[in-house]
Image: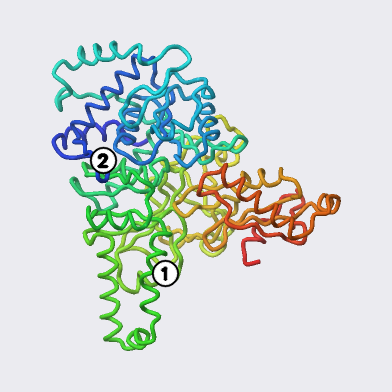
Amino acid sequence: MMQEKLTGFILKAIRNNWKTTAFADYGGKSYKYSEVAGHIIYLHTRFEVLGINPGDKIALLGKNSSHWAISYLAVISYGAVVVPVLPDFRPNDVHHIVNHSDSKLLLAADNIYDQLDAEKMHKLLGIFSLNDFSVLAGGKDSSPEDKAEVVEDMYQEKYPYGVQSDNLNLPDIPNDRLAVISYTSGTTGFTKGVMLQHNSLAANIVYANNNMPLNPGDAIVSFLPLAHAYGCAFEFLWPFTLGCHITFLTKTPSPQLILKAFKEIRPRLILSVPLIMEKIYKKQILPVIEKPAMKAMLRTPLLKSLVHKKIKQKLTDSFGGNFHEVVIGGAPLNSEVEVFLKKIGFPYSVGYGMTECGPLISYANRHNTRIGSAGKIVDTLEVRIDSPDQYREVGEIMVRGENVMTGYFRNEEATSSALDEEGWLHTGDLGLLDRDNYIYIKGRSKSMILGPSGQNIYPEEIEARLNNKAFIQESLVIEKNGVLEALVYPDYESTDKTGLDERELKVQLENYRKDINSKMPAFMNIAKMKIVPEEFAKTPKKSIKRFLYTMDI
């Protein structure tokens, strides 16, 4: 276990930065560290009056915002367990996660709450608004509104002159206590809630403090989903404990909005997913360097140096021009883009992780990146490649140590599959090591697909829906050119019986695609349906050999 404690980091950050700004909603209200403290203590009081005990689960549902961040801090510093839910999940998936996690309280953005059915979340004691912390609905016992006066009286009794830096205290929560249950999937039958202890979050913070370039007062833009471990740890939780000023993009973050915010806020550290960098390269850089005149200039050493310098400056300016480095993670970076960034000397770094490690597994800063590598294993973990020669023969990447989850909530089968008896987490990623413990990812041994913003996509969820449809015998969902494509082997016996020809079958499949997309998060939407003429190749256990279909077909 780590010596440092998460609540200690939070308390120290608030006391040391009492009068400075902690959070701001882009184009909206800002909050000083002192105001964040007041909200935390007030929420603690509400939890207590409502009968929430340490260890109870509290679900959190909404887009990135100051109130989301405040609620997260309030839950984990109370000793309760936060259950972050992606706002992209459909209402039925939200109901399922809230129920499966045994959540006793839900804090939800008003516009998302309007789509939910409170009666389907039968274990809740109440639902609070993330917009203003008002009561949206009562629970199974009584309405929280009935206890509002009790909350006020208790708060005034404990803090008659308000919360001050010298009277602020937070519970001393041991690192072996559960802090987060992070759901990587919401569909019934595929539910996987990653259980992370306080220790895992503390380990990520300690590593970041020692190895990543950020200082108190630095500006950060939070646009990656806070319900996802990557954005939560490094755009919010760690910067907050340092005393940074974090601006949340409260709307769906399009590349245009993100770059606009970067230019205005000029953040000191930028977290990015490959999609953004690849789009900039494809749309802004590639058209320039492929012009005949530019190609000629790039063949001349002196002119080539000047061109690269100019491109680097333009790219740097587009990210605000004030950052130490751009950390790229969440999904593999296109090799052509990485080689170009290295060539022009752009200050980028690479990280690799997964929710099950809260999330960090490896990282290398801008001065130590190695082409094709996902960074160096962090010092809070040990790594092993499951192959006869981990430096030359590809095998599954396995890690164990401070960051690793304790398992999947109420899912022993998935837990025993991921964590072996010696404590090694089987990542499902295939790779190699070099002698300096840099990781080189070569593929996946499991079916999970990483979405463009680092979301975990389990194709079996989509396939299960497809396979229940008429005229489909089996299906396989793959990633191709950055989008999801469904390969379908038709039930020809059914099509023959009904007289369905190929054109009519394609129309039916397109209708299925639209129907399934309407019931799944946007990042799991199928872009294309493709009919395959033969049954899929299978293992002796009748599992489809997925790896055969990830290549061009």
Image location of residue 501, percent across then percent down? 79, 58
Specify the label residue 41 is tagged with: none
Front one among 144 and 474: 144
Dot 2, how many residues are within 10 Å of its Cα: few (below 14), some (14-19), or many (20+)? Answer: many
Residue hosting label 2 = 240
Task: Give the mark nearest the N terminus, 1 or 2.
Answer: 2
Label 1 sits on a secondary structure element that is: helix
Task: Inspect this view and state whether residue 402 appears.
Answer: no
Specify the label residue 282 is tagged with: 1
Image location of residue 4, percent across then percent down? 30, 35
Front one among 32 and 198: 32
* Snapshot quadrant of residue 188: top right
**Residue at 60% over, 51% down:** 447
Q: Nearer the viewer, mark 1 or mark 2?
A: 1
**Residue at 20% over, 31% down:** 35
Dot 1, how many residues are within 10 Å of its Cα: few (below 14), some (14-19), or many (20+)? Answer: few
108 left or right of 531 in image: left
Front one among 480 and 422: 480
Farthest residue, direction right: 497
**Residue at 34% over, 38% down:** 202
